[in-house]
Image (cartoon, helix red, strand yellow):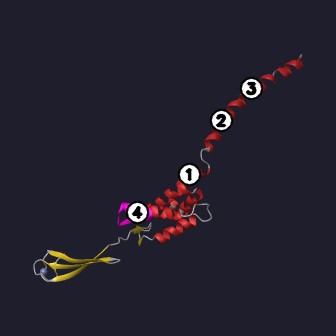
Amino acid sequence: MFCPYCSSENSKVIDSRDSADSIRRRRECLSCSLRFTTYETIQTRTLSVVKRDGNREDFDSQKLWISVKNACAKRPLPIGSIDKVISDIESDLAKLSRAEISSRTIGEMVMDSLRKLDRVAYIRFASVYRDFRDIENFKDEVDALLEPKTNDIDNSQLSFLEDELPVKKNKKRGRKPNAPISTIK
Ligand SMILES: [Zn+2]
């Protein structure tokens, strides 16, 4: 903080007052003894979201809230679930303390939260948010969610049946050749 009169770096605070959005400080220059006032404000950092097309826009928590709310529409979720998802993501974003983040990363964060919260909401959100190139991966995920491990059980049952079938056929084949022989006698 340089003195506006003599550009000295050294000053002392002689009065300090808080207000809603700033701190007002009255200072006295240690070199020329003139007094001046400074205001300290908190610099709220805006997070830039880098979209798929490379364009940037300010992070909009309201917009995110609406997209999550749409995904959760008519789902039997506890009150406050959506707010919790949004506030968790906001605090995760704050922890990252980055100036910009890809829309993709935010989408993944939402999907992680929704996957734990509600499968239908997760699939709805993912189907809107996911890149079209990922459609095969997405399909695999949906299949896995809708039919958890039932395929494995079906396959093992089928292979069990297949093992039994040839045994029954062999028994029948074994009897049939006897019939013509007895009619010949
Ligand atoms: Zn001065």
Name the residue type under label 1.
Answer: Asp
In the picture of the structure, the residue carrying the numbered disc 3 is: 170
In magenta, the rendered stretch is: 89-103
Q: Residues within 10 Å of mark 2 (few under 14, many from 20)?
A: few
Nearest to the eye among marks 3 and 1: give it: 1
Whether label 1 lies within 8 Å of ligand 1 gets the answer: no
Residue 10, quarter of the rendered image:
bottom left
User: How far apart are the alpha carbons under marks 1 and 4?
Assistant: 28 Å
- Looking at the picture, tell me which residue is in the foreground, 12 or 115: 12
In the picture of the structure, the residue carrying the numbered disc 1 is: 140
Query: Is residue 76 rendered to the left or right of residue 113?
Result: right
Sequence-earlier tag: 3 or 1: 1
Query: Is residue 97 rendered to the left or right of residue 170?
Result: left
Residue 180, quarter of the rendered image:
top right
**Are the residues tagged 4 and 2 within 8 Å (C-beta)?**
no
In this view, 167 is above or below 121: above
In this view, 155 is above or below 13: above
User: How far apart are the alpha carbons under marks 4 and 2?
Assistant: 49 Å
Query: Is residue 93 rendered to the left or right of residue 71?
Result: left
Question: Is disc 1 placed on a helix, strand or loop?
Answer: helix
Sequence-earlier tag: 4 or 2: 4
Name the residue type under label 3.
Answer: Asn
Residue 46 position within the rendered picture, expressed as x and y whole percent measured from the top left: 37, 71
Q: Where does the N terminus fall, quadrant-wise?
A: bottom left
> Which residue is depicted at the point 78% across and 26% down?
172
Sequence-earlier tag: 3 or 2: 2
In the picture of the structure, the residue carrying the numbered disc 2 is: 159
Was residue 76 drawn as part of the magenta stretch in this picture?
no
In the picture of the structure, the residue carrying the numbered disc 4 is: 93
Residue 182 position within the rendered picture, expressed as x and y whole percent measured from the top left: 87, 18
